[in-house]
């Protein structure tokens, strides 16, 4: 079996400052990897480089045997709307707020050539159901939705084309705890059922504990520790990871 | 000195005309592509056809016969003022007959009479970017055109059906040119969209404020976007003209009193008049 996604020696600098450096890993089909670290540790920079939003300065990114960085813009866009998905922290970045929920879900389908209104609508209704949004809200705009619903809508919009790899940037940030729990439950179900690979950036250790198979801890733009999630969280080796784990509030 | 001598032929100086003609050549070479051009200040406000006037000025020769219409009519303010403008600054012949004209400048209509080879249609365009209200960033819409990334245009039509049960866009209905560029046909009613397809006339589009020119060379394939299960329909008021009785022309609804009285009349006045004359 070949890895679905491999990264070698990835580096991104902002002038003299380091965004992230020396990052390398393999992601296998169906595997979920968490990236944790404090604010400013380079998590989001890394994710943007991986998803093709930012050109890295050095290193290589291979998806399914194809060099992502060498791809032309149309190829990368095609990939970004078929095999890949990107869930933004703020649903407003990932949704079209002036377009109805059905239109938001249907956009990716229409972008890859769907031209049958009835089929698009059926698929959209089905996906709204899967993310627990009532089907009578299909013609409402996302601005009429609660924060949790917007986030679920963004997830539906991204997963509708059946991607194989999902990038998530703090998918539960800014949601209250009970909504977070339900969203995580939903995400875990979808990821397991669809056999998705995912890279989840977060600073919430509970999220990775629940979702991720493997964990990468970042500090100052570098990867300081990797390993299976339970292993890293239960027996942290690096001083920073120990600090991170011990600073979780115990209720 | 007569008024004619006070201006260069057709108002614009020759360098400006050359610049516009270069943009026109590029636009004809890439049908549906929006070519930027250095739009000049014209002696009329934006929104009154400054783009169309510049294109007409760049195309006019002393032998041309000009027809100007506004919403199909030859006698409305915009049409009259632009026709007078060119009579004064170019001294060209003018006509109201579609068949006799060599250049037709139009606001929001295509004439009913079939166009012929050798004729030039000049459209006044307020907003050339069909994706504008869906994607406000110019950098992004240009990239979308470059990559033929037109899923978003379909989202607009989806929204129409979701909200109204059918594609409710009645004018400025987006078209795809030669299977490549999505183009705003200017705010003509969608009834006129089929007239753009495979037309023998050259069609030029000028947007003065937005500084864009685009074109459809003769016999270009122009398809209106739609869904398989909601096909494009070139709709018009379901009525006959109350003056000439035409059933196949695009109609304006005219309110005649405050008792709810109304009549439907051809929006193309030259077409309506010729039918009345034929009848007598």
Image: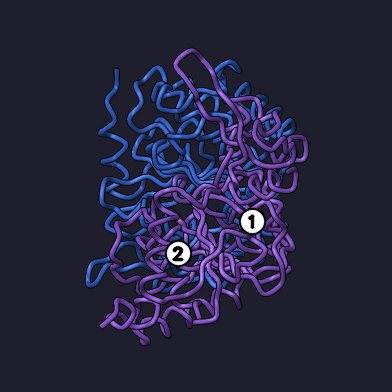
Chain colours: A blue, B purple
Query: What SS does tag 1 mark?
Result: loop
The residue carrying pointer 1 sits among few (fewer than 14), some (14 to 19) or many (20 or more) residues within 10 Å by Cα, namely some
Image position of B112 (left or right of A165): right
Q: Locate the N terminus of chain B and report the quarter of the image it occupies.
A: bottom left
Image position of B275 (left or right of B64): right
Q: Position of residue B109 (x, y in %)?
A: 57, 50
User: Can you name the residue that lies furthest to the top here?
Assistant: B259
Nearest the camera: B172 or A53? B172
Q: Locate the C terminus of chain B and report the quarter of the image it occupies.
A: top right
**Relative vertical location of residue A228 with respect to residue B137 in this rendering, above or below:** above
Nearest the camera: B247 or B205? B247
**Relative vertical location of residue B163 with respect to residue A27 in this rendering, above or below:** above
Q: Which residue sits at x=58%, y=65%? A: B121
Q: Position of residue B67 (x, y in %)?
A: 54, 63
Q: Position of residue B243 (x, y in %)?
A: 65, 34
The residue carrying pointer 2 sits among few (fewer than 14), some (14 to 19) or many (20 or more) residues within 10 Å by Cα, namely many
Q: Is residue A68 visible?
A: no
- Residue with the mark numbered 1: A4
Camera-side mark, 2 or 1 = 2
Nearest the camera: B259 or A17? B259
Image position of B225 (left or right of A61): right
Q: Which residue sits at x=65%, y=41%? A: B250
Image position of B144 (left or right of A125): left
Residue A71 picture quarter: bottom right
- Residue with the mark numbered 2: B52
């Amino acid at each position: 079996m070949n890895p679905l996604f491999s990264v070698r020696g990835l580096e991104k600098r902002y002038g003299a400052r380091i965004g992230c450096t020396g990052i390398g890993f393999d992601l296998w089909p169906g595997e979920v990897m968490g990236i944790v670290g404090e604010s400013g540790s380079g998590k989001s920079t890394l994710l943007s480089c991986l998803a093709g939003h930012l050109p890295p300065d050095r290193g290589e990114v291979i998806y399914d045997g194809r060099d992502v960085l060498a791809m032309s813009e149309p190829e990368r866009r095609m990939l970004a709307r078929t095999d890949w998905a990107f869930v933004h922290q703020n649903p407003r970045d990932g949704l079209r707020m002036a377009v109805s929920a059905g239109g938001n879900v249907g956009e990716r389908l229409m972008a890859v050539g769907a031209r049958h209104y009835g089929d698009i609508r059926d698929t959209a209704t089905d996906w709204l159901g899967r993310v627990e949004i009532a089907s009578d809200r299909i013609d409402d705009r996302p601005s009429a939705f609660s924060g949790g619903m917007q986030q679920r809508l963004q997830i539906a919009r991204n997963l509708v084309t059946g991607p194989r790899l999902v990038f998530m940037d703090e998918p539960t940030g800014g949601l209250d705890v009970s909504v977070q729990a339900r969203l995580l439950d939903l995400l875990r179900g979808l990821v397991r059922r669809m056999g998705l690979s995912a890279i989840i950036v977060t600073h919430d250790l509970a999220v990775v504990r629940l979702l991720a198979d493997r964990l990468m801890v970042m500090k100052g733009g570098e990867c300081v520790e990797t390993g299976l999630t339970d292993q890293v969280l239960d027996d942290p080796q690096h001083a920073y990871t120990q600090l991170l784990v011990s600073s979780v509030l115990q209720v | 000195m007569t008024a004619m001598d006070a201006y260069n032929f057709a108002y614009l100086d020759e360098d400006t005309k050359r610049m516009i003609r270069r943009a026109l050549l590029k636009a004809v070479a890439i049908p549906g592509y929006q070519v930027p051009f250095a739009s000049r200040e014209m002696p009329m406000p934006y929104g009154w056809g400054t783009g169309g006037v510049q294109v007409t000025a760049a195309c006019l020769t002393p032998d041309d016969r000009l027809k100007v219409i506004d919403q199909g009519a030859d006698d409305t303010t915009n049409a009259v003022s632009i026709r007078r403008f060119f009579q004064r600054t170019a001294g060209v012949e003018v006509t109201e007959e579609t068949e006799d004209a060599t250049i037709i400048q139009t606001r929001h209509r295509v004439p009913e009479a079939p166009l012929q080879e050798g004729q030039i249609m000049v459209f006044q365009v307020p907003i050339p970017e069909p994706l504008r209200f869906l994607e406000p960033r110019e950098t992004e819409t240009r990239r979308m055109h470059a990559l033929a990334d037109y899923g978003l245009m379909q989202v607009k039509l989806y929204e129409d059906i979701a909200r109204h049960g059918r594609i409710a866009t009645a004018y400025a209905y987006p078209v795809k040119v030669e299977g490549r560029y999505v183009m705003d046909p200017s705010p003509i009613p969608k009834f006129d969209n089929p007239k753009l397809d495979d037309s023998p006339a050259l069609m030029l589009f000028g947007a003065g404020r937005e500084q864009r020119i685009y074109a459809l060379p003769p016999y270009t394939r122009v398809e209106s976007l739609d869904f398989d299960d909601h096909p494009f329909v070139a709709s018009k008021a379901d009525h006959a003209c109350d003056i000439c009785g035409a059933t196949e022309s695009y109609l304006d609804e005219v309110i005649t009193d405050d008792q709810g009285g109304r009549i439907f009349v051809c929006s193309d006045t030259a077409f309506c008049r010729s039918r009345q004359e034929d009848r007598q």
